[in-house]
Amino acid sequence: MNYPNGKKKPTVRKTSDKTNKSFSNRGMTLEDDINTTNNYYLAINKAVIHKKPTPIQIVNVHYPKRSAAVITEGYFKQASTTDYNGLYRHKHIDFEAKETKNKTLFPLANIHDHQIKHMELIIENGGICFLIIRFAAYDETYFIQAEKLISYWKEKLNGGRKSIPYEIIKQEGYLIPFQYQARVDYLAIIDKLYF
Amino acid sequence: MNYPNGKKKPTVRKTSDKTNKSFSNRGMTLEDDINTTNNYYLAINKAVIHKKPTPIQIVNVHYPKRSAAVITEGYFKQASTTDYNGLYRHKHIDFEAKETKNKTLFPLANIHDHQIKHMELIIENGGICFLIIRFAAYDETYFIQAEKLISYWKEKLNGGRKSIPYEIIKQEGYLIPFQYQARVDYLAIIDKLYF
């Protein structure tokens, strides 16, 4: 662990904090923060990592004259892979990000079977695969290697616990440093673990 | 060139051919063929390559009681990257696929500036990047390395031609073999070029 823990912050998000230029993370969703981080990595040509678009089942499209096509009926589909992937230092990067309001554990129900299967394939094929978990109550964001997530997932299948305790994540995960531009600077962890 | 060219086929697509179990490719779109190919690669654990979902700007969502959320207003957004990416033999794979009805050339207007920029970044960061072009009139599908596409793109910016002639694609590209399950077996080309 490289960073101090336990500095508890209010659990209520304040949208006004979005314009706060301090190093506070309050008010931004994890997705916002990761997108900002990825844009920064791209801008400095450090990595090419993008969020995949949300998969949508399009049922009806209306084509008005002289204007853009409008989707008038669509449904959210469950993603079959993870949310983010890309390329860093010649390595394939693949990860999922989850935020929880739970203060004591991360429920494994947040991750689907096919996502675990996908993570196994990424590892087998030589990619770097992980999960980013934010505990909103503590404003702490952790990097968990997919290998560890998969092992807890398999314990669950064999009748084990249905969650990973916060204390275990603190021990086995890596607190992701918060930087002004790289708000979730997960490549700092990857540098230490894989290079 | 490993495969015979010039076996002209009808330009009209027959949807009834979709159930044809021969080695003919007629009636399937390039996207269908690539998705089938990627599913096959996944099934035999050869590669983990997926099409990214179409990016959609969601404007309105309706939440009916006791049923799934319905998107009632959405718009297609232009993709900022390429359509497909993934992992093969520890290498990051990234490509775009385009089908043309043109018999003599591939119009460069089919590729956007930001896609070219993305391709440059993938190459700089150690990925394998390319374009798959199908000439529907000839039922021929070619693999063009992104480096070559980028060089034609830059010539265009400097006042050069706005397309790549079919004859050049035949010379500088690689005809992708058509297999029953791997309908667009582009990994066969990657094996030869990069491994």
Image (spheres, coloured by chain):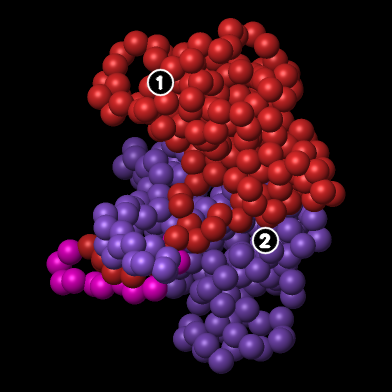
Chain colours: A purple, B red
Magenta segment boundaries in residue numbering: B56-67
Query: Residue at the location (60% across, 61% down)?
Result: A142
Residue B102 x %, y %? 55, 33
The foreground one among B101 and A147 is B101
Residue B14 place in picture, x, y as percent? 31, 26
Quarter-wise, where is residue A50 in the image?
bottom right
Furthest residue to the right?
A: B158
> Observer-nearest residue: B44 or B29?
B29
Query: What residue is pinned by disc 1?
Result: B10
Mark 2 residue element: helix
Secondary structure of the residue carrying numbered label 1: loop
Q: Amino acid at mark 2?
A: Asn
Q: Residue at x 40, y 20 (%)?
A: B10
Q: Position of residue B127 (x, y in %)?
A: 72, 37
Give the amino acid at mark 1.
Answer: Pro
Residue under numbered circle 2: A38
